[in-house]
Image (tube, rainbow, N blue to C red):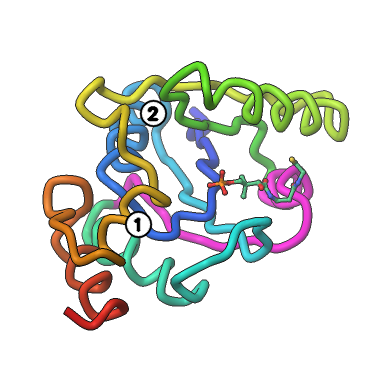
Amino acid sequence: MKEKIAVYPGSFDPVTNGHIDVVKRALVFVDKVIVAVADYSRKNLLFTKEERIDLIKTVYQGNKRVEVDSFNGLLVDYLKKKGINLIVRGLRAVSDFEYEFQMALANRKLSRDIETVFLMPGEEFFFISSSIVKEIASLKGNVSEMVPEIVAKALKKKFNY
Ligand code: PNS
């Protein structure tokens, strides 16, 4: 039988425990998740594309059900190139909804065959976002319960503490 694969796209600047929880939940209903790091982002990025990819690769080292890749250009073009029709995104709160809804509908307009599925992370991850993590780390706060150890180390290095 054909493997069911989902693409989990994002900036992952950097990957957090919330992202990791979403991947874990997706793996309940797909065989494989491709974590796709966007080369293009509207956001101001702290980590380079290579750094963001390397951090995720380290987290999933040895896990054959998670692949890490990057894409530039439109997300739907990346999915078409890969022959995949499923996007997974995490949805934490009402505040995420408008942005996610807009993206999902834009992607549907661009490609009718691609579906977006939203997964709710565990409530202990609801407050975690890459932006919050970066803000805390930039002020030398403790982010060890919000990100994997390797990411906490990388943040310390970026912010010199
Ligand atoms: O983690 P983010 O920054 O919320 O992820 C947003 C991302 C990268 C998934 C989104 O900006 C994206 O898909 N960018 C690629 C360009 C694209 O396809 N844009 C049209 C859909 S809105």
Q: Residues within 10 Å of mark 1 (few under 14, many from 20)?
A: few
Q: Residue at x 39, y 21 (%)?
A: 29
Q: Residue at x 45, y 30 (%)?
A: 90
Image position, residue 137 (x, y; %):
26, 62
Question: Seen from this angle, which residue lies furthest front?
Answer: 139
Identity, as a three-letter code, of the amino acid under mark 2:
Ala
For residue 26, which numbered disc appears in the image?
2
Q: Is residue 69 left or right of residue 76?
A: left
User: Disc 1 on helix, strand or loop?
Assistant: helix
Which of the 4 image quadrants contains residue 142?
bottom left
Q: Is residue 85 left or right of residue 94?
A: right
Image position, residue 143 (x, y; %):
18, 54
**Location of residue 56 with respect to 157 vertically, above or below:** above
Image position, residue 77 (x, y; %):
78, 49
Q: Confirm or deny contact between disc 1 and disc 2 (CB under 8 A).
A: no
Q: Residues within 10 Å of mark 2 (few under 14, many from 20)?
A: many
User: Disc 2 on helix, strand or loop?
Assistant: helix
**Location of residue 81 with respect to 122 vertically, above or below:** below
Q: Mark 1 sits on what residue?
A: 135
Instruction: Give the CA distance from mark 1 to mark 2.
Output: 28 Å
Image position, residue 13 (x, y; %):
44, 59
Task: Name the one closer to the observer, 41 or 160.
Answer: 160
Q: Residue at x 26, y 64 (%)?
A: 139
Q: Is residue 146 magenta?
A: no
Q: Earlier in the sequence, mark 1 or mark 2?
A: 2
Q: Is residue 92 left or right of residue 16?
A: right
Which of the 4 image quadrants contains residue 43?
bottom right
Q: Is residue 75 magenta?
A: yes
Identity, as a three-letter code, of the amino acid under mark 1:
Glu
**Location of residue 123 with respect to 18 vertically, above or below:** above
Query: What is the span of residues highlighted in magenta in the rendered image?
Result: 64-82
